[in-house]
Amino acid sequence: MNKISGTKKILIVDDSPTVRGIFNDIFSLRTDYETDYAESGREAIGKLKETLAAGDTYNFILTDINMPGLDGFETLDAIKQIAPDIRTGMITGFNVDDYINMALEKGVFNIICKMDPPEEILRTVDNLVTGEGIFGIENYLEPDTSTIRHRITNTRQLKELIEEILDFARTILDEEKIYGLKTGLVEVGTNAIYHAYGYEKGTSVELKESEEVTIEFGRDSTRFVVVINDTSGALTKEKVLTQLNKGINPSPEDLIAAGGRGIFLTRFLSDKLIVNIIPHKRTEIILIMYLTKDYQESKPLLINQI
Amino acid sequence: MKIQVREEDGVVIIKPEEEIHFDNYKEVEEKINTLINEGNTNIAIDLENVSQLYSMTLGMLNKIAAQVTEMGGRFSLRNITSNVRKMLKMTRLDKIIETR
């Protein structure tokens, strides 16, 4: 992703006037966004052609998925034919998991939930438009929230740190969320050690000096956030989406497979999972657990690869 | 890890005496493989001391279930906690691995 500075021109495609109105409210808070709206895929394509003909362009097009006429995937297909370099994203009020198969087929790695808090929708759009503010726990917590960061050098430390994090989280999260958090920490933590650096699973491991795994956590007034980083960057966005799809829509072979469920379980049991990747350099997994039961059902698809 | 082995009604039951973690589950797998190699094909794991399963342990259970079934035997899990049951259901392994 290349960085964009100055005013960002975005096109929002949604057949619902109510939703377009909500987006208008969200983006009117920001002076660095110029927003345009279309109520169908056809109208969006028309607007894009007109804009390009006038020597201008959109920095980002966000489309609803379920619309009469062209759906979101068909709309994005047409947009990519006309202007392959325009950044795009999808949004839905329905269950994102229902679209994972199609997302894999079409190479869509970001689907935002309409039910998400407005500030999170705005932040995600910001991330997608600018390519900034993606890596780092500070981007997912309220400003000036203090955090605790540890470097992990072996599997024993990982086990101890998971218990420390759970002790901290037990004071603010209910038992069900603790179960989800524990699962996510084990899955992502072990992935960062065993898979990232190629160690044999199920054994005690001592990382080499060059093999860095860090875990950072903190809480603000609405959420508990844990960020797990490794410097191998072994994961790819295609691999993450493939594994999610195998968990959501398993084939008979996937059901009896010996591995590959970690990322699916983590997303399923955490309130929000964000995967950030710089290939061969860095993988950052962000787990968010909200302090209340709000947003439990809205699980966006957020995979960013720079 | 200490692992108890007992036999009940022709079934060899393996009971880990502590949690199965990401850094010790190979010991359970090795124990079961030894029992299979000795000709035991009716095998159960007693999970009374195991509060939670993860993808790595699920993978191990899947491998053992496939191995035992291929040999015409039977594999099951016993004394499972609600969290273990939940995990099996989430991954749809409750359709593949017998629980008691």
Image: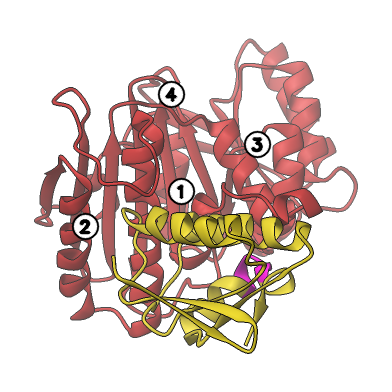
Q: Give SS at disc 1.
A: helix
> Which of pointers 4 and 1 lies earlier in the amino acid sequence?
1
Q: Residue beneath label 1, please?
A: A27
Q: Are marks 4 and 3 in contact (CB under 8 Å)?
A: no
Spatial separation of the CA atoms under disc 4 and disc 1? 25 Å
* Mark sitting earlier along the chain (4/2): 2
Q: To which chain does the residue with label 3 belong? A: A
Q: Are marks 3 and 2 on the same chain?
A: yes
User: Which mark is drawn over residue A306?
Assistant: 4
Of badges 4 and 2, the one in the foreground is 4
Q: Is residue B28 above or below residue A303?
A: below
Look at the image and tell me whether residue A20 can be seen. Answer: no
Give, as a single range, the part of the protein colored magenta.
Answer: B89-93
Check contact, mark 4 vs mark 1: CB within 8 A: no
Residues under labels 3 and 2: Cα distance? Answer: 29 Å
Residue lying at 20% horizontally and 31% vertically, measured from the top left: A212
Q: Are marks 4 and 2 on the same chain?
A: yes
Q: What secondary structure predominates along the stretch shown in magenta? A: helix
Q: Which residue is mark 2?
A: A142
At horizontal 33% and vertical 75% (from top left) the residue drawn is A178
Report, in whole angstroms, how far the alpha carbon at label 1 lies from the one at label 3.
23 Å
Q: Which mark is residue A108?
A: 3
Residue A152 or residue A249, whichever sits in front = A152
- Disc 4 with disc 1 on a shared chain: yes
